[in-house]
Image: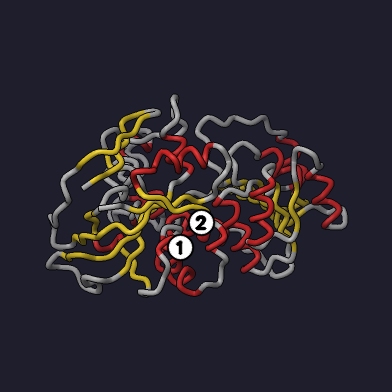
Amino acid sequence: MKAIIFKGPGKFAYEDRPEPKIQNDDDVLIQVLGVGICGSDLHALMDPPLHPAKPDIIFGHEFCGRVVETGRGVDGLRPGDKVVVDPHPPCGSCNNCRSDRPEMCSTLYCQQGTPWFEHGEIRGLFRDGGLAGYACIPAHSAYKVSQDTPVPLMTLAEPLSCVGYAIEKLDIQVGESVCILGAGPMGLLFAAMAKANGAAKVIVSEPHEYRREKALCCGATQVVDPLSENLKEVCLDATEGLGVDHCIEAVGQLLPVAIDVIRPNGKVLMFGHDETAMPQIRLAEIVRKEANIMGGFLGKYYFEKTARIIESGILPLEEIVSHTLPMSEYQKGLDLLRAGKALKVVIYPEN
């Protein structure tokens, strides 16, 4: 089968790999139907990289498929089922998993204080992922969706699970105000989720006009160009001088901005992932406002809920997928994203 292979910083190859086979009783073999290109993929393909990945693995962690074969011990799935895939399921046995912290599973991040990427088990970044014709995964990584679920929307399951779990930390109440920094795919998912959770005002800050227009289609009640407008003044004007109840940072370098726009006792959700970011922060502002700052990374047992959200049609997910391309045009997808001319690019295998 043809596959996209990560070769190291700045390098990938489109080459042949053997089709995987069922190895364990709890394995599921799926035909890959679609794979989303993630910002983490772009960061791993930079030189020097902004995100770690293991060379010579099949790339792509935002994937979905159709079940082809199941191991003898698999219940609940059968050939023909359409599934979304959790590429980073917890092991269930480490200290973090047994202490109700599965999103911090030691097999995914760290063991005995060593860097998380040295023990990474995330499919598509540290072991074979979905940018190929077929993938063999453990059954507990597969979540069934209805047969009429569109494939492009299925590929959003992994980012949506991260966004859904993270936004629940804010506990947004009906009528509250939310500011979102960045209108990439993650920022748009946050805008849609904030609106669905009852936010009355959803202010999205984004320098690219195309993405600002998409934000208005995804739940934003107001958009701001931070290059020509004063975001803090916009947020103060929209909240009678108080500041927004919540700010979601979906860029990776704008924590000081997020702290600046929230009200006293407001909440900041730091979600943008940039391994190199070291912004200067006015600590007194955090103390004076008694700000609540939290991080969000991966979903905690959220994939089952994600599958139901996608099926429901409650979110305008179709606005977020901007391009679908065959795997042989993977480079074109990267180029579109790097040029800011795409949102979520979905790749489909040709074999």
Quick check: 335 above or below 28? above
Query: Residue 155 sits in which quadrant?
Result: bottom left
Query: Residue 111 sits in which quadrant?
Result: top left
User: Which residue in the structure is indicated by mark 1?
Assistant: 153
Total labels drawn: 2
Q: In this view, does 350 lie to the left or right of 100?
A: left
- Any part of residue 304 in sight: yes
Q: The residue tagged with tag 2: helix, strand or loop? A: strand
Quick check: 261 above or below 275? below
Q: In this view, does 308 lie to the left or right of 341?
A: left
Closer to the camera in the image, 281 or 343: 343
Residue 182 location, x and y as percent?
A: 63, 46
Closer to the camera in the image, 300 or 141: 141
Residue 49 location, x and y as percent?
A: 44, 29
Disc marking residue 321 = 2
**Amino acid type of the residue that numbered disc 2 sits on in the rendered structure:** Val
**Amino acid type of the residue that numbered disc 1 sits on in the rendered structure:** Leu
Q: The residue tagged with tag 1: helix, strand or loop? A: helix
Cα–Cα gap, marks 1 and 2? 7 Å
Look at 70% across and 70% down and name the residue there.
174
